[in-house]
Image (cartoon, coloured by chain):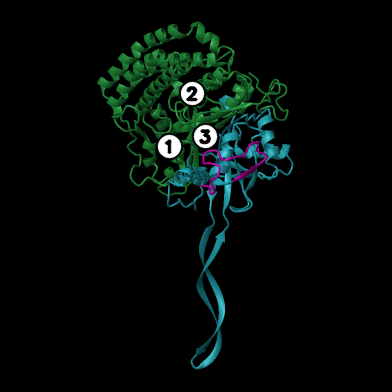
Chain colours: A green, B cyan
Amino acid sequence: MTVHAQDGEKLEGWNRPRLIEPAGDGDLLEVAMGPHHPSTHGVFRMDVALDGERVILLKPVFGYLHRNHEKIAEGVSYLASMPYTDRLDYICSLTNNWAYALAVEKLVGQEVPERAEYLRVILGEMTRIVNHSSSIGFLIQEMGASGTPLMYAFREREKILDLFEALTGSRMMCNYMRFGGCRVDATPAWLDGVRKVVAALPGFIDEFEQLLRSNEILMARTQGVGILSPQLAINAGITGPMLRASGVNYDIRRVDGYGIYNRFNFRVPLGDHWDVYDRFMIRMLEMRESIKILEQALKDIPGGPIMDPKAKIRGFRPKPGEAYGRIEGPKGELGFYLISDGGPNPYRYRVRPPSLINLTVLEDMCLGTDVADVVLIFGSVDIVLGEVDR
Amino acid sequence: MKTVEEIKAAIEAAVPGAGVEVVLNPGASGQHSLRLAPETATAVATFLRDDAELALDFLSNVTGVDWPDKEIAEKVKVKRTVTKTVDGVEQTVEETVDETRRRVEPGYLEAVYHLFSVEKKSAAAEPVVLRMRTVNRSDQVELPSLTPIWRSAEFQEREVFDLFGIVFTGHPDLRRLLMWDGFKDHPMRRDYVEPDDFEYEPTAHDAVLARAAAQQAASKAASQAESLAQEGPVGGQ
């Protein structure tokens, strides 16, 4: 796809939200949706100006959960931030660990043993399934199907979280990756448990998809709603399932091939209509691709150490320099930018939060739609407030 | 993928007088960066986005870095002439002494941009890093905003403005992002001092409380006047 071939690309202001004129001459109704709105699953506010039901203006307001994660991380050693990355996007702690470990490994030029890479892939893909299934559940719940699809998703999620707990000691705050490997080794019994859960997952996804995919209400509410053009999606730095639902073939697992992703055979599903339904379907299809990766990884996982024996743990002081490392998190590109001045603490520690940056186009997608669709469009972005506000 | 030197040469060919410098990264990651002059940054950024060969259409990460004033102490050998009394005779002698000279290297704020290419995705495993410096950390903290070129900078530049205090000129909506609007300082700066009282937030509460107190006093006075008026006829009976 040639993105730059489009006309109008260079016109000034093409990437700004368009102006919507209210019909008639009545007053606009200003509504603060949030910070405790049921649809925001967290503390997030949208200041919306309405003309009847139509959205004329929408400004997101952030910071209710701000704790300055970056400043805290700059005051402690590199390893001490690892458990705190769990709390960024608390649904996918393992991919947060992975992104941070990857950035530090880039900073010091650290290699990771084979078995640890496989374990990372297995845990990362299981995290993706957890995230996608529950985010679909939340999306359907916001449409008014309170509970049932979400409980279906949570039932499977619980099986995976049990595996996380068996390996790392914690269901959600796993704190598992280390610079140069992983913390504890997986036993053969644990791997058999994973194989059992993974073997049952396609059945769950079939059931889940059959329940939802051709549901009349879901199709009526989501098709043609919240359209995001690929040009704007790229320009606004949208990543993850949202970008691919807009038809842009950009998956960092493919592009960077970080870790050992080059070895696996999987497809990158792309959207064709760029709407909420596509975002829902992309997540469904990505779960199937994750299962494919899991099956291959579980077949090939070798023995051996899980930590590089030469990795320095005590007195960890990277040489002066900087590094930006990124992975394809379940929500999009999760990156860490680190500057070292040779000391034990990072001089600069920056999280590139996909949830925050994916909200850049929330206004563009919502303008001109009904206020009831705002909830749906917001749900299709898939954010976690712990990562938005940091 | 082009190296930073090649990108620099391409920029200089396209934007005359661009004033781009290569900043080498001594670390293991090998992610070198390009320092842009703030005056030409918009033109250079537009070139980087629209050039068919580079096609850096995807701005991933924007962040700030604070580099405070650094005091550098150097030992230098200084020759000087002194008058000394040697063997009872006053003489002028030249001698060499060590002297510690202190100079202050002025600090600055830096904005860092990480770019990738979606169009040429196979070649872009490492980011192209752009940096810009402000003149100082106090009153000349303006940098040109790159939001008109890459929309993804919109919230991230607001965050940098909020936490570091870099003012991005040309940003369409430059407000604080994470801290509240009445907040005065920039928390991510190295010399930021946390307040003693973490609970105190200068929200509208004080004004509301003052208004409520005034209203209570007024209604109390009114009710007193009312009860006096009711008592009046009782006392008169």
**Amino acid residing under circle 1:** Glu
Residue A105, disc? 1
Cα separation, mark 2 vs mark 1, equals: 29 Å
Compared with A114, B22 (above or below) is below
Q: Nearer the viewer, residue A325 or B133?
A: B133
The type of residue carrying mark 3 is Phe
Taking the image as drawn, is residue A75 in sight? yes
* Residue B182 part of the magenta-drawn span: yes
Magenta region: B166-187
**Three-letter amino acid code of the residue under disc 2:** Asp
The image shows residue A221 at horizontal and vertical percentages of 54, 12
Q: Nearer the viewer, mark 3 or mark 1?
A: 3
Q: Main secondary structure of the magenta part?
A: loop
Disc 2 + disc 1, Cβ < 8 Å: no
Which chain is disc 2 placed on? A
User: From the viewer's perspective, is the residue at label 2 or at label 1 nearer?
Assistant: 2
Mark 3 Cα-neighbour bin, 10 Å: few <14, some 14–19, many ≥20: many
Picture residue at 41% right of the left edge, 27% below the top: A92
**Discs 2 and 3 share one subunit:** yes
Q: Residue at x 46, y 38 (%)?
A: A66
Q: Which residue is the site of mark 2?
A: A382
